[in-house]
Amino acid sequence: MELYEVENFWKFDMRVGKVVGAEKIKRTRKLIKLIVDFGKEKRTIVTGIADQYAPEDLNGKKFVFVLNLRSKKFAGVESQGMLIVGEDENGKVYLIPAPDNVPIGIRVW
């Protein structure tokens, strides 16, 4: 395992967002398009977990997202962040929901 200085961690802008829209991206096996509310703004975020989760598993729930990544297009949809999940050695993905009482937009560290 490579070790980093803690200053590298602080570079990431991680915030709690609430998924207000989720749909499978047509003609893809793993991609889900999310509309995520961060309080002051909404962003489109693409996640590659549709082989293990349905859009309705995400809709209406709060999760942690990384926001200060360069935008990237997936199947023609621009993603403006990344959903944080857990993954085991077998490739099983685990959603990590934020508690309901945590405000959207709050910074995570």
Image (tube, helix red, strand yellow):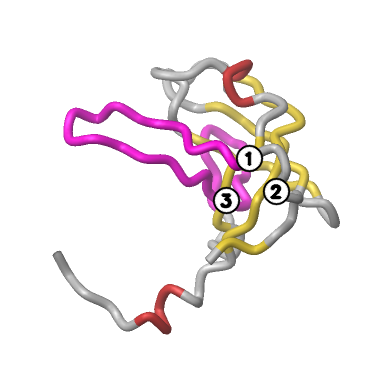
> Could you tell me residue 25's position as x and y percent?
58, 22
Q: Which of marks 2 and 3 is nearer the N terminus?
A: 3
Q: What stretch is highlighted in magenta?
A: 72-98
Query: Which picture quadrant has residue 13?
Result: bottom right
The vertical placement of 77 against 41, above or below, is above
The vertical placement of 14 against 96, above or below, is below
Residue drawn at the location 82% of the way across and 53% of the way down: 41
Labels 2 and 3 touching (C-beta < 8 A): no
The answer to whether residue 74 is left or right of residue 106 is left
- Circle 1 sits in a helix, a strand or a loop, which is it? loop
| Amino acid type indicated by mark 2 | Val
Label number found at residue 99: 1
Query: What is the number of callouts on the image?
Result: 3
Which one is closest to the eye, mark 2 or mark 3? 2
Q: Bin the neighbour count of mark 1 within 10 Å (Cα to Cα): few under 14, some 14-19, many 20 and up.
A: few
Residue corresponding to mark 2:
102
Is residue 92 inside the magenta stretch? Answer: yes
